[in-house]
Structure formats: C-alpha cells, structure tokens
Image (tube, helix red, strand yellow):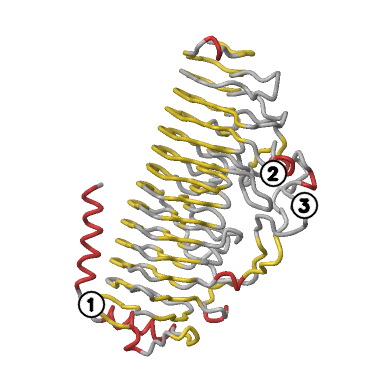
C-alpha cells in the first residue's frame, strides 16, 4: 500500500514540475459570464501535444460546458479559481439522449486535477427547488403509515428530494483510465453523480471537499465501478444521495461512462473521511453484473445520513471480503423519496431482476466475509442483515461494536419499516416490520462478539428485541451487553428461531429465547 501511494504522489510531483499553460493565455475570460469551453479545451490540447504539463486556472470565475482531459495533464485550480458549469444544457456534449457534465476523460493515463480552487457544477439551476418528488419505486402500500409514509405535515419540501429538470449527468467522468489523481480541490453543486470512476486502475482521491445540495436526488459523491487499486482518503463529502459508492456495474441504464464492463471492482480503500448522505454514506453493490471484493473502510465519521454503510446484492455479482474498522455512524429517518430508513448498517441479498433460464440472471451472487470492528453507532433504526432463500448471507462478524438506538421525531411518519428497494417483488420493497436492535435472516456464519446495545428515549411499541435471528446456521454470540426495548414488555435480549449450530457465551441477563434451534 505504501509503495502504491508513493507511486501516485511521485506522478503528481513529476507532472507538477513540467511546463505550465495558463488558460487566460489561450482566450479564457474569468468574468463569470463568458463560456470558456473552447479556450479551456484548446489549452488542454496544447498541453497534451507538448508532452504534458500543468493547465493553470488562475483566480476568476470561468464558465464552461463539457471538456475532455488528456494524458499527462494536471488541471490545477489555484486559490480563488472557479470553474463553473454553464446554466445552458446545450453547452454540454450530448450522448445517448442525455448530456455529459463538465469533464469527460477516457482511455487516458497520468491525469491529475489539483489545487485549492473550486469546481462548481452549478447544479441547483437544473432543479425545481420548490417541489419534492413523490415516492415512486415500490409505493407506500406496504408501510406502516400507508399513504402518509414520510409525508411532510405542512406540505413543504421537508427533506426533499427536489424535482429535477433536464440536467447534465456526471460532473466528472474517468473511463478506462490509469494513474488518476484528484487532490485538494473543492467540488460543489452537482446536478447528478459528482464523480464516476469507471474501469480505472490506480486512482487516488485525496483531501478533497465534495458538497452537493442535500435535497438533490442522484447528486452522489464518488461512484466507483469495475475498477481496481483505488484510494479515497482524507475527504469531506456531503451528498444529496449516496456519498461513496463501490459497485460492479457493467452498464447502468442510460448513464454515460459505461461500455459493457466485464471485470470486478477490487482493492478499494476508503479511509479518514467525513461523510454525510441523504441516502447511504457508503454503498457497496446493487445491480452488479461483476463482483466486488477486497474493500477496506477505516477511520471514517458518518453523520446526518439516512443509512450508514449499506451492502446490497440484487444481481449475479458477488460482494466479498469487506472490512470496516474504526468507524463512527450516526443515521436518522428522513421524509421524502430517499432510499434507506435510518439503518446504521444494512446488508441485504434479494433478487432484483427477473430470472431467465440459461442466462446470467439465473443465479444470484452472494455476500460473504464481512467484518465490522470497533464501530460505534447512534441510529433511529436497527441493524439489518437480510438474506433470502436464494442467496444466504455468509460469514458476517461484529467485534467490539456499540449501538445506541435513539428515538426519532419522524417515527410517526417513517418508523417501523424496512426498505428493501431494488428487489424484484414490489410488495417487498417498503414493508412494515417490528424493529429489533439487530435483525438477521437467512445468514450462515454470523458472529456477534463484544456488542453493546442501549435504547435511549425509544417510545414506539414496534421496537422489540435486542437481537433477533432466524433461519440461520453456525451462529456465535459472545459477551452481548443489552436488553430488549424497555418500552416493549414482551421484548427479550435475544430471540433465535429456526436455526442450527449455536455457540453462545452469555451472562444470565442475556439468556436467549429459542424456538426450533438445533445444535
């Protein structure tokens, strides 16, 4: 790992020492009005043709549409420099019926975006900020609140999400690139995913601030798909959707940047980051054609998020070898059409596509080898480990985890439900359910060790047991400190049903209630 980081930093140093091309010398005008797409592209092309170097963006506000970065180019924004996206959708390059965002780069290497300046995507102009989207996928019929689920009492925006207009897609795309560095810049107000890293090898994203409108749908932070050897470190990300995503998509609807990618995402490290998200702070998986493996998450703080860490299997790609260490998580319920319902940790494996015999859709992948060590949670919903008969979750370990289950002011409009959206059965996407501290089903090789659960101010009767696991094999629980919900007189510390092979090391206050459990 140290060798890899050193290699990346050396590449930045070498690029930074070569010749410099000031965009104002090529016609760019930083008056906040002039569209400088051609001037910036001309500067980049000249730098590239001369063997590479630094394209300097000096102090000023430079409006642009879509530009293409090139190999051996360091786009450097000095302090006070702003590259701002045009408000005219026609200034962005069209592709497949939509439009690229500000930067599209493919089949290139040794590319850097650096400096303390600002890339401002100007995204708010592409939304109706006076209206909130309605809940679409799955509907609300299965929820506890029915038509009042996540409804805003005064009919206002609440937590959004606001309604998009025609908008540019990803602000920054790197596709099939090697040795990419994005360092120190401030990236703001994307109208769609901020950054897509697709099919790339050896990427360092370090020390950036990335802030989008927390009411804006699809305004993700960093999306990584089918890439390898990637580090995201020392970043502050506040996203109006998922903050960091690691997936194995081969393609994704009409979204630009995908070309039927057919290899796994692997060796991804996320460390020393502060994250906020209106959906999942860190999301691994969903509709994955390719597998995702060897993901390490460490020393991160997650606050003000709808979900903390989510691991979702809905397709044939497996998700495996995921390690989470030294992470603090705070999550809450939200109004509006956001995916997630306050879970600090969500792991689910359910079918998301129609099964067609003889095709790659025939068999689901698996989630396996997932560990959470030294993790502190404060949340308004429980931890969920939701496998299915078709894809049992394997080998999940919790070691030295604390969980303070807290009350929510939105329980009446959003509480007492689980969110499995992305699953094929629409009736199972948003569903009413009683909520224990940890709920698990169809899971093999689950270990819960040195886990402390507290309940703070929880008042709803649908909060139930401390731990509830059913349809399991090979379960180990040791040194659990916790109770069922104090508000629910029938709640127990541990409820186990329909399982085999238990290894329980518990004090007398945590004696489990067991039904149809065989050793």
Q: Position of residue 120 (x, y in %)?
A: 47, 71
N-terminal label among 1 and 2: 1
Work out whether 459 lies above or below 216: above
Quarter occupied by residue 489: top right
N-terminal label among 3 and 1: 1
The local secondary structure at tag 2 comes to loop
Which residue lies most toward the right here?
147
Q: Which residue is mark 2?
A: 410
Q: Residues within 10 Å of mark 3 (few under 14, many from 20)?
A: few
Q: Residues within 10 Å of mark 1 (few under 14, many from 20)?
A: few
Tell me if label 1 and label 2 are in contact, CB under 8 Å. no
**Spatial distance from mark 1 to mark 2, Cα to Cα?**
58 Å
Tell me if label 3 and label 1 are in contact, CB under 8 Å. no
- Give me the residue at 69% from left, 31% from top: 459
Q: Residues within 10 Å of mark 2 (few under 14, many from 20)?
A: some
- Give me the residue at 58% from left, 46% from top: 306
Mark linked to residue 267: none
Asked if residue 296 shows in the view, the reply is no
> Position of 284 compared to 352: left or right?
left
Work out whether 207 lies above or below 171: above
Q: Position of residue 507 (x, y in %)?
A: 50, 11
Q: Which residue is mark 3?
A: 153
**Spatial distance from mark 2 to mark 3, Cα to Cα?**
11 Å
Asked if residue 59 shows in the view, the reply is yes
**Spatial distance from mark 3 to mark 1, Cα to Cα?**
60 Å
The local secondary structure at tag 3 comes to loop
Camera-side mark, 1 or 2: 2
Q: Which residue is mark 1?
A: 51
The local secondary structure at tag 1 comes to loop
């Amino acid at each position: 790992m140290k060798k890899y980081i050193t290699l990346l930093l050396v590449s930045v140093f070498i690029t930074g020492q070569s010749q410099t091309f000031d965009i104002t010398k090529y016609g760019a005008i930083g008056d906040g009005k002039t569209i400088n797409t051609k001037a910036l592209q001309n500067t980049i092309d000249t730098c590239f043709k001369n063997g590479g170097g630094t394209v300097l963006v000096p102090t000023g506000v430079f409006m642009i549409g879509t530009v293409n970065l090139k190999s051996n180019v360091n786009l450097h924004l000095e302090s006070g420099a702003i590259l701002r996206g045009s408000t005219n959708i026609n200034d962005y390059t069209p592709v497949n019926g939509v439009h690229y965002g500000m930067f599209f780069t493919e089949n290139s290497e040794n590319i850097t975006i650096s400096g303390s300046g600002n890339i401002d995507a100007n995204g708010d102009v592409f939304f109706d900020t006076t209206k909130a989207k309605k809940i679409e996928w799955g509907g609300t019929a299965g929820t506890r609140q029915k038509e009042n689920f996540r409804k805003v009492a005064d009919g206002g925006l609440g937590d959004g999400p606001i309604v998009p207009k025609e908008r540019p897609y990803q602000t920054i795309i790197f596709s099939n690139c090697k040795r990419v560095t994005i360092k120190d810049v401030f990236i703001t107000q994307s109208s769609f995913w901020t950054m897509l890293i697709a099919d790339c090898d050896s990427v360092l994203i370090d020390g950036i601030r990335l802030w989008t409108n927390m009411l804006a749908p699809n305004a993700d932070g960093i999306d990584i798909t089918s890439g390898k050897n990637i580090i995201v470190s020392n970043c502050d990300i506040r996203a109006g959707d998922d903050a960091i995503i690691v997936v194995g998509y081969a393609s994704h609807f009409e979204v630009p940047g995908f070309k039927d990618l057919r290899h796994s995402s692997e060796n991804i490290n996320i460390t020393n980051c502060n994250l906020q998200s209106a959906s999942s702070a860190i999301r691994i998986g969903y509709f994955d054609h390719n597998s995702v493996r060897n993901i390490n998450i460490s020393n991160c703080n997650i606050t003000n998020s709808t979900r903390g860490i989510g691991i979702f299997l809905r397709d044939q790609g497996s998700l495996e070898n995921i390690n989470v260490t030294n992470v603090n998580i705070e999550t809450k319920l939200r109004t509006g059409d956001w995916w997630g319902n306050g879970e600090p940790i969500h792991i689910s494996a359910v079918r998301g596509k129609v099964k067609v015999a003889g095709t790659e859709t025939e068999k689901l992948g698996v989630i396996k080898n997932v560990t959470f060590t030294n993790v502190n949670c404060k949340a308004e919903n429980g931890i969920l480990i939701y496998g299915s008969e078709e894809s049992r979750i394997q080998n999940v370990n919790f070691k030295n985890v604390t969980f303070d289950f807290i009350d929510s002011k939105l329980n009446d409009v959003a509480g007492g439900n689980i969110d499995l959206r992305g699953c094929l059965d629409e009736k199972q996407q948003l569903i009413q359910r009683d909520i224990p501290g940890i709920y698990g089903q169809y899971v093999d090789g689950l270990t819960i060790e040195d886990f402390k659960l507290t309940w703070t101010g929880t008042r709803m009767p649908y909060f139930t047991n401390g731990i509830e696991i059913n349809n399991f094999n090979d379960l180990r629980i040791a040194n659990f400190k916790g109770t069922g919900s104090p508000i629910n007189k029938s709640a127990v510390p541990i409820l186990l049903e329909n399982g085999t092979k238990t290894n329980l090391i518990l004090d007398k206050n945590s004696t489990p209630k067991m039904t149809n459990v065989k050793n």
